[in-house]
Image (tube, coloured by chain):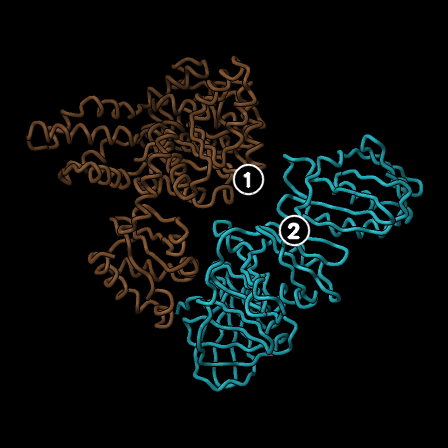
Chain colours: A cyan, B brown
Amino acid sequence: MKFNVTKEKLLEGLQQVQNVVSTRTTLPILSNVLLQAKGNEVHLTTTDLDVGVRGSFEANVEKEGATTLPARRLFTIIRELPSSEVQFEVDGKNAASIRSGQSFFKILGLPEEEFPPLPKFDNAKVITIRQKDLRDGLRKTSYAISTDETRYVLNGLLFSLKENKLTLVATDGRRLAMVDIELEFPRSHEADIIVPTKAVTELQRLLTDDGEVKVSVGSGQIAFDLNNTLLVSKLIEGNYPNYKQVIPSETKERVTLERETFLNSLRRVSLLASDKSNSIKLNFTKNNIDITANTPEVGEAKESLAVVYKGRDFSIAFNPEFFMAPLRNLTEDEVFLDLIDEMSPGVLKIATPFLYVLMPMRISS
Amino acid sequence: MDENHAQLWQKLSAALKPQVSPDTFKRWFSAVKLVKATDDAFTFRVPNNIYQFWIESNHMAALQAAIVTAFGAPRKVMFSSASEDVDGESLPEIPGKESARENSRDAKQSSNALGLNPRNSFESFVVGPNNEIAHAASLAVAQSPARTYNPLFIYGGVGLGKTHLMQSIGQYVGMKKKNAKVMYLSSELFINEFIDAIQHNNLVKFRKRYRQADLLLIDDIQFLGGKERSQEEFFHTFNTLFDGHKQIVLSSDRPPSEIANLEHRLVSRFEWGLTAELQPPDVETRMAILRKKAHTLGIKLRDETFDFLATRIRTNVRRLEGALMRVASFASLSGKELTNEVVEHLLKDILQEEARHAVTIEQIQRRVAEHYDVRLADMTSKRRPANIAFPRQIAMYLARELTKASLNEIGDAFGGRDHGTVLHACKLVKRRMQEQDNIRQTISFIDSALQR
């Protein structure tokens, strides 16, 4: 195998795939990236057996062939190369010679045959989504995915395909984020699947604002085809809990908040939320919210916010981090906060189909 | 839900209602059923797992507070989800379900074939502060093998429940997943089969047998120590299973780093997942164990007798159960009333054995002097070169840890030293134990030799 390429293209290609590389060292092949030169393209593939990514870059291929090389090492070498022209050559024993300007590197790889192939998707159900919609949906929900490994069905994002809607749901037991995306697909494609966190994170990195993504759902696995990049992942087995149970059926009070102003206030006040209780209190009075936090023996913070509010006076406490997470990931100027009472969950909404349910904390006073 | 449970639940809901908002109660607790109530735990049945997740995350404090209000003492709270039952994953104790009973019958058959004792199940395991972590970890592993802690390494002294926990995991998994290949064996059997395989030249078959397991449970792994070829074979088996996302559970009488002659790469792998220790049960837990055991065996004893057994037999659950059996059989055979004197006479030998654990300062001095090859007289002498002073400090430390003697008494026993000297010695030894592994090992070795 032999090809010439610019440093930028090679680096960009490696960046797309290198995050997936396994950190487990027991199977050395999994820390390698598979390089396949064919036509005027070089394909790159990495996998940790759960998630796999395949990308490519254009190159001037002089001799076709394939090999695998340690991904992290290759990436750090390419990043440091002095010249923008890179000459890549691999001999029959999988030793790669990299020449660029005055530099010469030789790194040893493993044969292509040892690399586990990505799963095939025959007879899979295929759905097409606009990349922008999916990217937006993932950003609005993925922060709420649980990291508690004992509840493994929650360690991923629910993709619920029903009634010409794709519903994305994430919850960790204290909060729940949900987005609906309008979508056309045949009834036979209706399904509930759970995509693991790692795949969601990688997918977010790969999605752009243009074009479409082709989603193929096979048995126990899913593939996202983004024109020149392919992400394949195992699905989490099991049934996602009935999340609808969590969403309050009716709420009593509603305030409209300017997202950024409110987020900034929360961020400032949360500086004095104690590590132990980690809560901030919202005191609602007529046309005003007082946001307060205090830590015994440290100090307290308070900020007032003028809002339109005509409901009854009451106080409710939330975990500031859980409250700020959706605000950070939304882009809308205005958000609506719906409340019932101090012991019932708060619901954050925007003009488009999005919902965030957040459990209050107990006020001890 | 039988009537008794319904009443309990009513009592509990009454206490719970003021704790949570009406909407919360209606939404989360109206569909909950109490299906099992014991002296120390409640099992609630919920329609599906979102109830469990949400109640655990948000309403646990309220629920526990309500339990204390209604019943005066905290209980362990467990959930079983009805939606899981539909998938054939039911817990065996849920009554009135034909499929559940069949399940447990199947499990019995298959577990017998595996060499698992059906009596060793999670239900019969008494949880106390001494074994909470190990129990929770085992349950997590059983419920979702290879997803949480892999490998799980359980260690602890004789008769504290290592085998019980491992067999519980094996049975739980065997029952829930019919197709899962569960393998339970002692490391001795592993070694023997390995030797046999070498002898008859069928290593391939041996490897295939173990490397196809979905769940591998190996008891008393410390016996691998010093067996190099077996270790190597086990190393490869371990890697194959681990990379294939299969659960591995190991037990030993000591932590991985203290198993003698165990290759470093194995030690580091054993420490990879979760290492959970089983400690001797405290008096309340011993009491709970006795009551549970008495209940399953249908033995009726007076509270006084339970109390006597629980306080006097401290170190070993197996011995505790043996004592219970002996007392119970004496009572039923002779028909005599069981006073503490009778029980004391009956358990003479066991109690003597227990009493031997009361270590004296003199024994400690002798043992330490012997270990460090210094004269016993040096323990009390005024000389203080490092090779004498440090063993002396270790002996003081052990005297502080193992006997009830005060600082002054210890000082006196070490040649009329000041209590401050003893305190200094204890602090110093503690610090050096944290800093240096070999010192910690030496001391724990002397410690266990003394307790024997």
**Amino acid at pointer 2:** Asp
Q: Is residue A135 left or right of residue B409?
A: right
Residue B386 or residue A353, whichever sits in front: A353
Label 1 sits on a secondary structure element that is loop
Give the x, y percent position of residue B35.
Answer: 28, 54
Residue A300 or residue B355, whichever sits in front: B355
Q: Where, by quadrant of the figure, is residue A62 drawn?
A: top right
Label 2 sits on a secondary structure element that is loop
Q: Is residue A83 visible?
A: no
Give the x, y percent position of residue B108.
Answer: 33, 36
Q: Is residue A127 left or right of residue B41?
A: right
Label 1 marks which chain's residue?
B
Where is B315 relative to A258, above or below? above
Q: Is residue A156 visible?
A: yes
Q: Quadrant of the C terminus of chain B?
A: top left
Where is B338 relative to A201, above or below? above
Which of the two discs, 2 and 1, sits closer to the camera? 2
Q: Quadrant of the N terminus of chain B?
A: bottom left
Tell me, for residue A335, which label it has, or none.
none
Q: Where, by quadrant of the figure, is residue A246 drawn?
A: bottom left
- Badge 2 is on which residue? A122
Give the x, y percent position of residue A20.
Answer: 68, 48
- Badge 1 is on which residue? B245
Mark 2 Cα within 10 Å, few/some/many (few <14, many 20+)?
Answer: few
